[in-house]
Image (cartoon, grey):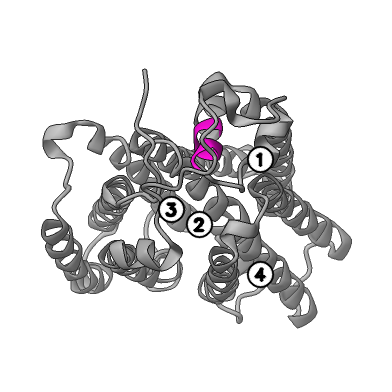
Amino acid sequence: MLTIGDYYYEVFPKYHPSRVLTLVYEPFAIGTMAILAYKDEKLNTRNRNLVGYILYFLGTLALLLLDLGTSGKGGLENYIGICVIVASFGVGDAYAQGGMVGDLSFMCPEFMQSYIAGSGASGALTSVLRLVTKAAFEHSSNGLRKGVILFLAISAFIEFLCIILYAIVFPKFPIVKYYRSKAASEGSKTVLADLAAAGITTPTEIGDDANNQVGRLSQKELFIKNIDYVLHLYLIYVLTLSIFPGFLYENTGTHNLGSWYAVVLIAMYNVLDLVARYIPLIKKIELKSRKGLMVAILSRFLLIPCFYFTAKYGNQGWMIMLVSFLGLTNGYFTVCVFTAAPKGTRGKCVG
């Protein structure tokens, strides 16, 4: 939705879409995730993730149908409808992303990096898709809307494929079955439905020690052990979301790129965010120190005055460079925090 902000600014010019939709999304995502984290040990992880993916698909399809049903008209009623759909994305995010991170925490840090890099890849792919669909209809009548309709249709189809892949293909990977069996043998009940979907009824394949709870932490102990990493993530995204996307759409002026300006800025952020999520694979430049992470993340707040003065006095080249650096630091620090944070299980990586 961030990548089609140019369309929503044309349809709802008075309602600040990039700012409002972000603010609508966040409380539903955080609130739902907090509730699910509290009840985590009683949840069926497989169902949780499927609910999230289904909400993604239905939400995107609803955006498409709403636009088609209203013929792309503005108005408060239609805007409220979009806000409701965005709220459902927040709930879906809490279900799917929170569930997948929990799922992979049973495994090993390398898998966590791969998942986070995958989320960065989805952002880059989305930006490429948006650039292509925008260019395809640039010179046609009502081309902006036509490009968005095609964009939403393709996105909904991809998300439908994600449901199928997670429900049918993912549980049957040998490495996934191994780690889920290991987690079950250590006392986890949240992976039992996943094992059943893969045709495993008990964790006996790797040794049945389901009553062995050694090494497992309570929710309170795990939270306390990770409290500084929680703060790290909070500070990373407080800064990122204070600039991206609202500031980029509303406070960077108009330049030679015209209607492409904000779309290009979003694309550059997403591409550099993706690149940065692979940098920690180079162990020599991976930042693991807790104090080092805090100092580096706090120093990132110097970007705020940089963006202010660049928007006021700089040209589009400087802004593109600055947005790229924002994405670079966002991706790098996110991966460093998630892979360095202590995990609640004993699992180690295997070949």
Which SS class for mark 1? helix
Q: Which mark is first along the chain, 1 or 4?
A: 4
**Residue type pointed to by label 2:** Ser
Q: Quadrant of residue 306?
A: bottom left
In this image, 143 relative to 104: left or right?
right
Residue range highlighted in magenta: 181-186
Which of pointers 1 and 3 indicates the residue nearer the eye?
A: 1
Which SS class for mark 3? helix
In this image, 11 relative to 67: left or right?
left
Q: Which mark is first along the chain, 2 or 4?
A: 4
Task: Report the residue marked by disc 1.
Answer: 192
Q: Could you give the CA–CA distance between mark 3 and mark 2, rounded to whole angstroms?
A: 12 Å
Question: Badge 4 local density, few (<14 within 10 Å), some, or many (20+)?
Answer: many
Which SS class for mark 2? helix
> Quick one: 6 or 170, which is closer to the camera?
170
Task: Report the residue marked by disc 2.
Answer: 259
Q: Is residue 7 above or below residue 30?
A: above
Does the magenta portion include 118?
Answer: no
Q: Is residue 128 above or below residue 315?
A: above
Q: Could you give the CA–CA distance between mark 1 and mark 3, rounded to whole angstroms?
A: 40 Å
Q: Could you give the CA–CA distance between mark 4 and mark 1, rounded to whole angstroms?
A: 30 Å
Residue 252 visible within the image: no
Question: Badge 1 local density, few (<14 within 10 Å), some, or many (20+)?
Answer: many
Q: Which disc is residue 87 wearing?
A: 4
Which of pointers 4 and 1 indicates the residue nearer the eye?
A: 1
Task: Report the residue marked by disc 3.
Answer: 266
Q: Which mark is first along the chain, 3 or 1?
A: 1
**Residue type pointed to by label 3:** Ile
